[in-house]
Image (tube, rainbow, N blue to C red):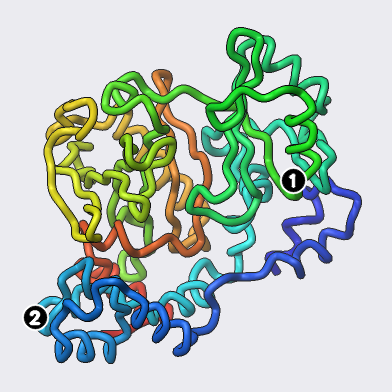
Amino acid sequence: MASNIFIYIYPFNINPYQYFTLMNLKHTKFSFVNYLLRSIQHKHLFKMNVFNTISMMSKGFDVESIYLYSLNKTNYKKYLPDSAIPKISLNSNNGYWPILHDKFVFYRFIKDKLPTGELLGIVFKGEITAVDGVFGYAELLEGLKKSNKYVLKPLQGGNTTGILFLSLTNEALILQGKPIDQDILKSTINGLNEYGIFKFYEQHKLFAKIYPGSINTIRLVTLYDFEQKKPFIHASILRMGWSRSAPFHNFQKRGLVSLIDNETGLLSICKRKDENGRITHQSNHPDTNQVIEGMVIPFWEDIKGTILAYLEKNPFLDYVGWDILVTDEGFLVIEANHNPGLGFMQAFKPLLEDPRGANYFKTKNIYAS
């Protein structure tokens, strides 16, 4: 079904069905061994109440979640357990997960339908292939000379793994913030496979004011309401970097997150992990001292209206984590996730707390509390 997508969008000189067979879903089976190893190796395991920990683990939560959410018998029913992650992979998005699993496929699918950053080329086995028009190594260098910046990202995978930032400053090539020569650039590209070369876009001045050392983006999670037969926004989070996480904003790497009010776009107090893995709260940015709580996300009405209208026309995408960059001119959908991480989202808003969310996971045979 979903493999038919590749017939008209895949650019490489291999059979698109071959690529589909190589595009494997992650987290499709629950591994009790891995689950147990993660829990045993958690650095705070032996500081936690052993009886409560065993009780919560029997409900499907790993030690990290128990520790992060302070789970106990009075609150655990609001949270989707870690044991449900494989079923999310298998049962959500009606078999159309490849659209969300690969950045090139996703780009082709949403181009001209949603605002998105331009994908200029694909690095396949060390060679640059243009997505549209002409784009190769020479065009990459020419673009840098014209003050363009680029982001090189693996076509599959997430959590900022493998992302490279490329620019030209004072005639010096800069990769990951460090000067390099053309030989190193060529060698780097030659070593890449199934990477996308995306045009870099500057973030909104408000987000740069919060912290300019990272690209601060929105994660917006949508689900499908089977009773009302329409999509809804479960929760939205602004993710921000700081000196301990830059150039990234990952919550798992101690980046800051702030809940966005779905109605108003108003930002809440920030949360982040401290050095002990506990959630701390603060209203100001730890480096810039910029007040974050109470700020309003620019273009918020446009963002949520556009995403929900798109999903009305594509209801088979029933559980999506959207990554959105806000610029001074509007917003761009950077990518979307088939099985978005539970950690930082549930730290603000547990997935089962909203009856619509609980009904979604029950209807999709993912989890029933």
* Residue found farthest to the right: 13
Checking the image for residue 192, the label placed there is: 1
The residue carrying pointer 1 sits among few (fewer than 14), some (14 to 19) or many (20 or more) residues within 10 Å by Cα, namely many
Residue 152, position as x, y percentages in the image: 63, 37
Checking the image for residue 323, the label placed there is: none
- The type of residue carrying mark 2 is Thr
Residue 359, position as x, y percentages in the image: 30, 75
Decide if residue 116 is on the left or right side of residue 32: right
Q: CA distance from mark 1 to mark 2?
A: 49 Å
Position of 226 relative to 251 (above/below): below
Checking the image for residue 74, the label placed there is: 2
Q: Which quadrant of the figure has residue 71?
A: bottom left
- The type of residue carrying mark 1 is Leu
Residue 298, position as x, y percentages in the image: 29, 27
Helix, strand or loop at mark 1: loop
Decide if residue 187 is on the left or right side of residue 298: right
The residue carrying pointer 2 sits among few (fewer than 14), some (14 to 19) or many (20 or more) residues within 10 Å by Cα, namely few
Residue 103 shows in the view: yes
Do residues under tags 1 and 2 come within 8 Å of each other at their CB atoms? Answer: no
